[in-house]
Amino acid sequence: MDASAATSASRLQRYEGTLDVSVRGGKLERCHFTPPMRLFRPHAEGGEPRTVVIANVAGGVVGGDRLNASIDVGADEALFATTQAAEKVYRSAGADAVLANWFRVADGGVLEMLSAGTILFDGSRLDRRTAIDVAAGGRLAYAETVILGRIARGEVFRTGRLRDRIQLSRGGRLAWADDFALHGDIPARMAAAAGLGEAKALVTLVLAGDGAAAAVAIARNLPVADGLRIGVSALAEDVVVARILAVDPAQARAALAGLWSRVRSAWLGRPARMPVIWSV
């Protein structure tokens, strides 16, 4: 990039948006957001908890954007949260898009935070940090799907950068941390058997709370089709991490729905289905 192009790029408008939600006393105690972040509150289906939908009305993120989202679920409250659509991360002129998420669950609280996913365009640069703190008596399910390219258009994520960090604490103490990165020779890392093994979509599902280990047997009994791999580990009786790798992103999404619809019924007493707001 020459000097004039660099100067022009530095002057491009970039977003610094925030969203802050707190559920306490049987209501949304706090609901604050700045553009391009928005929060929608659809009516919950029968048998489902209070439901919110997080949206980025800018239509995606570009290098230089900084977006923050915070959800705080109070004692004995329940919330289902998802995103309006898969977040699109566009090709960058050189700067990282920075996304930061904070999720907190108090004693007796339950949070299902199931993203619709993130699509990395070729040449995009994303730095995402997700911090989760679940009290000893709280329960949380967090799911994120990363899609490496616009697969339907024949585009694969070959250049750019991804760094995706997750930290889970129980009662303020670190219980699990993950730092996933893709850069440099990305096609080789995606193809490697010790890497992604040709997968184009990666799902991470984190469960925290008493009884979470019951998800292991459910996951291991799921049917696995060609081009799909599912692994699950109980790090403790109250912490489970599941990974889904798929060549076809639609397979990954279907596998997540199949797994979580069974787990949420056995673990949370919810209907054995994915809420419609996530499925559309």
Image: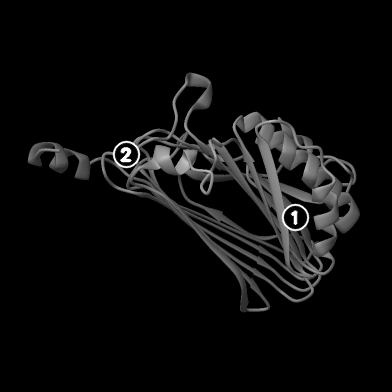
Quadrant containing the C terminus in the rendered view = top right
Q: Nearer the viewer, residue 113 or 256?
A: 256
Per the image, the residue denoted by label 1 is 79
Report the side of 156 relative to 40 (left or right).
left
Asked which quadrant contains residue 91, the reply is top left
Q: Which three-letter amino acid code belongs to the residue tagged 1?
A: Leu
Within 10 Å of disc 2 (Cα), the crowding (few <14, some 14-19, many 20+) is: many
Per the image, the residue denoted by label 2 is 92
Asked which quadrant contains residue 82, the reply is top right
Report the side of 59 relative to 208 (left or right).
left
Q: Where residue 10 appears, x then y in whole percent?
A: 20, 45
Local secondary structure at mark 2? loop
- Real-space Cα separation, disc 1 to disc 2, in angstroms: 34 Å
Q: Where residue 90 appears, x then y in whole percent?
A: 39, 35
The first of marks 1 and 2 along the sequence is 1
- Residue 192 vs 109, above or below: the answer is above
